[in-house]
Amino acid sequence: NAVNGVINIITKRPGDTQGLLITGGAGNQETGFGGVRYGGTLGAHFRYRLYAKYFDRAKEAAALGVPADDGWNVGRGGFRFEWEPVPTSIVTLQGDWYRGGEEATFPERGLTPPLPALNVRSVHVEGRNVLARWHYVLGERSEATLQVYYDHTARRDENDEDTDTIDVSLEHHVGLWSHDVVWGVGYRWVSDAFDGVYGAPVDPPARRYSIFSGFVQDQVPLIADRLRLTVGTKLEHNDFSGFEVQPSASLVWTPHPRHALWLAVARAVRTPSRSNQDLHFLLSSFPTEDGTTGQVVVQGKRDVKSEKVLSYELGYRVRPWDAVFLDVAGFYSRYDDLATTQAGAPRFVDDSMPHLEIPIQFGNKASGDAYGIETAVNWQATEWWRVMVASTFLRTHVELDSSGADLAAQSSPGDSPQHQFHVRSFINLPWNFELDTALYYVDILPNEGVPSYVRVDARIGWHPVDALELSLVLQDAFDKQHLEFSNRSGSVQPTEIERSIYGKITLRF
């Protein structure tokens, strides 16, 4: 469901993290954090890594100047084992466990008017996962990976939640003549269960669903070392929207080793979620003229469709000098069947407490487009000074169809900043000191009532010896606090990010 981008998480193999690492620190917002990691070997073919860490973060400032109720803490630990019985085979087993708590604000729901007030609740979260992967080299231009993953998450607040996920995938990378082909298949099974103070927030409260998927991608060199075409598609069948096709194609032209021009087009979907189809909870209550109680109830719909996007991208990368790298990319995206909410016809419910019910239902009654340009510059000014500059311009537009009435969807372009800009500097000073600074600018969010802001961060580090690193970090140096997000519906307490400072110690053996 990464419609507008992909989150790519890269982890290090145990062989790259050998020895002991200890970190710790504290500050006014980061009130305490620390971690320990150890990597070792057993014989010539087995490597492992163990870790444990913890953090505790203080409350932020509420928009009204009083402490917000959003402090939280989490402890976690895990392992990664890697066995290489032969040079062509790698077996990996890894797992994680976490447990923590947080404070959060929830609207007090019930049948008694007036509108629900915000109340502070303690939330408990915990989870665990384990992953097994076998990577095998089949030949000079052929390799395969089989992976099995299990995850359990639990959340305890006014609505308890337990979710189990099992995921199995197979990927094969093979070279066929001048083609470079990657294909794979996957299956995901999810089981969830909800239980709350006022009944489950979804109906049914427990559900199991599956996703079958497959993909294929072919990279073809049209002109050797000059022009490359990549085409592929993802195929998926899920229990929410049925069969989905997501094709993509890109063309990369490199007329010179320092220049690259690329063009891409792709179709992606955001499939409906469990809440889009099964959500059922009381949003607010109010008194009616005849003395009964009225309720506004959010309801999911089983016929909600996938949100769809067709995106076009054009980019240019150039390295005019050895010390300078420039990347410019423009994009245009067209969205259809965007999710909306719309009030349905009121009805009188004659149950143990008769009341008037106004349903708010999900639908797909909006479309829109977005376009913009992104630039990035990386400049190695000297051997000891590196500068990174990046900026983003974004314009969005949403329109409702003739039967749509979702004002929130129509005003949603005001939820994203049109302009963003940041500069980062990394300086290696004499006597093993480091000075890193960053400046960020984020444009106004008119729909959220959030003004534009500038943030300046700084870090100074010192390595008195190779095994020891001391650092001091200051975030938001010139602003005591600022607002980054708001919520005009009143269901979430808006908070302001406060200036923070913390020290950190890192030991490596």
Image: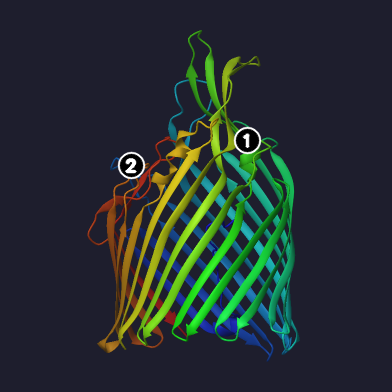
Q: Nearer the viewer, residue 50 or 80?
A: 80
Q: Are marks 1 and 2 in contact (CB under 8 Å)?
A: no
Q: Secondary structure at mark 1?
A: loop
Reply above or below: 59 against 402: below
Image-based side of 456 in relation to 1, left or right: left
| Rendered location of residue 84, percent (x, y) | 71, 85
At x 36%, y 46%, the residue is 495
Location of residue 131 by image quarter: bottom right
- Mark 1 or mark 2: which comes first in sequence? 1
> For mark 1, what is the residue?
300
Disc 1 marks a residue whose amino acid type is Gly
Res. 352 image quadrant: top right
- Amino acid beneath label 2: Gly
Identify the residue at image location x=34%, y=59%: 420
Identify the element where label 2 is drawn.
Answer: loop
Residue 127 left/right relative to 378: right
- Count how many numbered circles sit on residues in the image: 2
Residue sitting at the far right: 138
The residue tagged 2 is: 449
Chosen colour scheme: rainbow
**For the residue carrying disc 2, how many other residues have a C-alpha within 10 Å: few (<14), some (14-19), or many (20+)?**
some
Per the model, the C-alpha gap separating discs 1 and 2 is 29 Å
Residue positioned most to the top: 290
Say which quarter of the image contains residue 447.
top left
Q: As displayed, is residue 318 above or below residue 277?
A: below
Q: Position of residue 239 (x, y in %)?
A: 73, 47
* Res. 120 in view: no
